[in-house]
Amino acid sequence: MSGSPLLNELIEALRCLPGVGGKSAQRMAFHLLERERERGLKLSKVLEQAMQKIGHCSRCRNFSETPVCAICASSSRDRHVLCVVESPTDLAAIEQATGYRGQYFVLMGRLSPLDGLGPEELGLGLLSERLAEGDVEELILATNPTVEGEATAHYLAQLARAAGIRPTRLAHGVPLGGELEYVDRSTLAHAFGSRQSVE
Amino acid sequence: MSGSPLLNELIEALRCLPGVGGKSAQRMAFHLLERERERGLKLSKVLEQAMQKIGHCSRCRNFSETPVCAICASSSRDRHVLCVVESPTDLAAIEQATGYRGQYFVLMGRLSPLDGLGPEELGLGLLSERLAEGDVEELILATNPTVEGEATAHYLAQLARAAGIRPTRLAHGVPLGGELEYVDRSTLAHAFGSRQSVE
């Protein structure tokens, strides 16, 4: 197809990236070969390391190349607050947007019996052990506001209450900078129902 | 940012790919770690090989990991027809779309004095030698129908005529499946002027 079997192999291999089809893979391969050999080589090395060494933190299940991740190992993070998220992406979003200084627990999914994701797959045994340690005073439920995320939050809230821990949930409502006219009906109804008194 | 320095490094390294920003790089890294470790590892190996071994064919300047590329080395390709393209992408497009069985010459650019791309940078010396060998009878000018591509084609046509070789140019006109109403004016004017008699 291009006169170079190795190039064809590279184009094929690049298609393992999400959202990358034949055309994009070809463009990426040519771009790297024409202009970014150094960075391409660097990418190959980092990628190999990452695929081989990154596992899961034994405390919070987040991605980590060490047995315990940097956040769990840090002495400057508050051990009394634990925030439960569905994925490492959500954790990264909270780290970037908020000044949260507590710890995390990453479910790596949400309760979804049809997909074979039950309490065991989400490491809820590990979470229960963590709650039983007695350090945690507040469990922040930061699962997504989807049907499955809400069900997961409901389940986790019961788990927290059983351990005598206060569960909290992220506030729902009208996004900042949004216009009421364009907010979906259920969010608007929720925001209206949860209105707060102005100080 | 994510609790894993190696993961942050991977996200940063993925940004060398064209069209990939911070968000996409993060999504790619998580996708590979969660679902495609094997293919990710395979990609790292192929990428390393490609960055180190792929150079340029000494006859046609196309990407090749061997001194002479597969197309130039093939005995089943017609040595009497030579098709000049701007980039390996164009070569791949012609290979995929047409039944062309001749050989190629890849300029790796187009004449563009302002960008410092002159005859030397496009390997036109190599092309002249090739034409002087005496095998080539037709030089197909398949540069892009842009201002610079046309200028390059014009220059190449002179080169061909000087060597006593017949230059040809890809036909311009209304694309198949297009509607006249939506064809741009210059293409339509060209197609109208170059109308052909119906057999």
Image (tube, coloured by chain):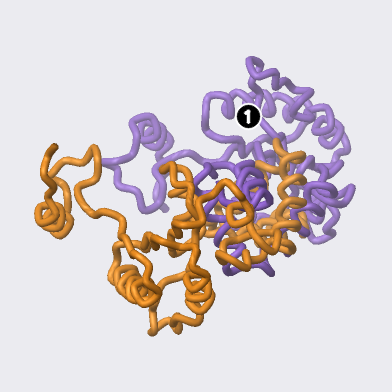
Chain colours: A orange, B purple
Viewer-proximal residue, B12 or A144?
A144
- Quadrant where the C terminus of chain A sits is top left
Q: Position of residue A56 (x, y in %)?
A: 63, 66
Q: Residue at x 64, y 21 (%)?
A: B112
Q: Residue at x 66, y 40 (%)?
A: B87
Q: Residue at x 36, y 31 (%)?
A: B189
- Quadrant where the N terminus of chain A sits is bottom right
Determine the secondary structure under disc 1.
helix
- Position of B196 with respect to A48 (left or right) is left
Q: How many marks?
A: 1
Position of A108 relative to A20 (above/below): below
- Position of A20 with respect to A154 (left or right) is right
Q: Position of residue B65 (x, y in %)?
A: 84, 51
Task: Residue under label 1, please give it.
Answer: B153
Viewer-proximal residue, B62 or B79?
B62
Q: The residue under label 1 is which amino acid type?
A: Ala
Q: Which picture quadrant has residue A149?
A: bottom left
Q: Note whether residue B94 is visible.
A: no
- Position of B178 with respect to A123 (left or right) is left
